[in-house]
Image: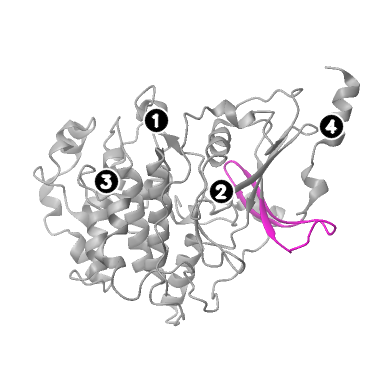
Amino acid sequence: MDFEYKQKTNAERAKVEDLFDYEGCKVGRGTYGHVYKGKRKNRLNTDGREYALKQIEGTGISMSACREIALLRELKHPNVISLQKVFLSHTDRKVWLLFDYAEHDLWHIIKFHRSAKANKKQIDVPKNMVKSLLFQILDGIHYLHANWVLHRDLKPANILVMGEGEERGRVKIADMGFARLFNSPLKPLADLDPVVVTFWYRAPELLLGARHYTKAIDIWAIGCIFAELLTYEPIFHCRQEDIKTSNPYHHDQLDRIFNVMGFPQDKDWEDIRKMPEHGTLTKDFKRSNYVNCNLVKYMEKHKVKPDSKQFHLLQKLLTMDPTKRITSELAMKDPYFLEDPLPSQDVFEGKNIPYPKREFLTDDDDDKADTGASKAGGADQSSGHNQPPAKRVRVMPPSTHIHNVQAQQALQFSSSNIQTSTSSTYTSRF
C-alpha cells in the first residue's frame, strides 16, 4: 500500500487515547482483556456520560471477540448491552470495544446482600426488586432467543444493572463472547464448543454431554440466578474447580444438582437414557442416595415457601428435562409477574442505590484478579470474585432480524462503527 496513503488514513483514524480519558481508571481484568471506565475528553464531554472501554487481550482479534462484535452490531434491545463503537489501533495492534458503562452487576449486588445478611444488617430495597431483575433478564433473553441467539454464559457477573442516569436501574445482559446463532448450525453445537456455560450455572443436559442442546440451557442458568437472588447463595455451588477439558461431564457438579433437586426419575426425564454420558451417570451415582433431596426442602431452608408463586416459577425454570423447561416467553407471562408489586423498569424504584461503585484496580490488583471477574459493558469490570462466576415493563417484541452473521463481518472495513483501514492484518486466537 502507498506509504503516504497509510500515513493519511492513520492520521484520520479515530484513536481511543485522543477521544477518552481512562488512564488509571481500570475497573476489571478478565480472560479476554482489560476494562476501563472512561469519559470523553473535555472538549467532547458535553453530558458527562461514562463509558466502558474494553481492550482485547493480546494482538489481533480472538474468535470470541469476533463473535461478540458481529452479534452486538445487529442486536438492539433495552436489556442487552449496547456496543457503541470498535476501535482498531494499528500502532500497537490493539482492539478496543466501547460500551455504555454499567456501575453494578448481580454478582456484586448478591455479594453485598450476603455480607449484610451475615452481619444482620437491613438493606432498604424495593419489595419487587428481585421480580424486576428477573423480568428484565427474561425480556432480554426472550429477544435473543426470538432472534435465534443462544447466550450460553449467563451468570450473575454477566447481568449488569445501570446506575444513576437515563437508564437508571435497567438490566443489561452482557458478555456475548460465547453467544451463537442456533437456527441452522453446520455442525452440532457441542462439536463446535464442547464446554459452555460457567459450570455452577450449567444445565444437566450439558453436564451429561448433550450434542444438540437448545435455548433451554439459558433458561436453566436464569433459574440458578433467580434462586441466588432469593437466597444470596449460589444454588449449585460446587467446591471443586471446573476442569478445563473438552469433556463437559462433571461428577461433582451433578452431585450438587442432585443434592438439591433429587435424582431425576425416568418418568420425569424420558430422554435421559439418550444422553451420551448416561452410562457414566449410572455407574457413578446411586438413586437411593438422593431420595430425601428436593427443591422444596432446599428453598424452605431459605424461607421461600413452596406454595408461593416465586417458588412455582423457580420450579419451572429448573426443570431437569430440557423439553419440559419453561420458555422465556411463557415465563414472562407467569402469575408471579401479575401479582403486586409489579415489576418495574427501574429495579431500584427511585430509591437510593445502596451498592458501592466499582473500585479502580492497581497493577497489583490486576495481577491477582480472578479470570472469572464480573462484567460490565460486556467485559470484566470488577476486581474479581469467587464464582466460576409502578408501571409494568412492556414486553418488547424483536425489532431486528438477525441474519447469518459470520465472524468475518466483525471486521468489515466499510462499517461506520469500525475505525480501521484495509492495510492491517490481524491474527485470530482460539
Q: Could you tell me how far apart the alpha carbons at marks 2 and 3 are, in whole angstroms?
A: 29 Å
Q: For label 2, count other residues whose C-alpha is less than 10 Å away and answer few (under 14), some (14-19) or many (20+).
A: many
Q: Who's the residue at 8% across and 44% down the image?
A: 267
Q: Earlier in the sequence, mark 2 or mark 4?
A: 4
Q: Which residue is mark 2?
A: 378
> Disc 2, disc 4: CB below 8 Å?
no
Q: Could you tell me how far apart the alpha carbons at marks 1 and 2 are, in whole angstroms?
A: 25 Å
Q: Amino acid at mark 1?
A: Ser
- Please indicate, yes or no, whether residue 237 appears anywhere in the rendered image: no
- In this rendering, the label closer to the viewer, 4 or 3: 4
Q: Could you tell me how far apart the alpha carbons at marks 3 and 1 are, in whole angstroms?
A: 17 Å
Q: Who's the residue at 47% across and 46% down the image?
A: 399
Q: Amino acid at mark 3?
A: Leu
Work out whether residue 244 or residue 351 is closer to the camera in this orientation and state it. Answer: 351
Q: Which residue is mark 3?
A: 254
Image vertical order of residue 391 relative to residue 37, above or below: below
257 left or right, relative to 238 = left
Q: Secondary structure at mark 4?
A: helix
- In this rendering, the label closer to the viewer, 1 or 2: 2
Q: Secondary structure at mark 2?
A: loop
Q: Which residue is mark 4?
A: 10
Q: Could you tell me how far apart the alpha carbons at marks 2 and 4 are, in whole angstroms?
A: 28 Å
Q: Earlier in the sequence, mark 1 or mark 2?
A: 1
Q: Secondary structure at mark 1?
A: loop
- In this rendering, the label closer to the viewer, 2 or 3: 2
Q: Which residue is mark 1?
A: 246
Q: Which residues are magenta?
A: 24-52
Q: Earlier in the sequence, mark 4 or mark 3?
A: 4
Q: Who's the residue at 45% across and 56% down the image?
A: 156
Image vertical order of residue 79 relative to residue 169, above or below: above
Q: Secondary structure at mark 3?
A: helix
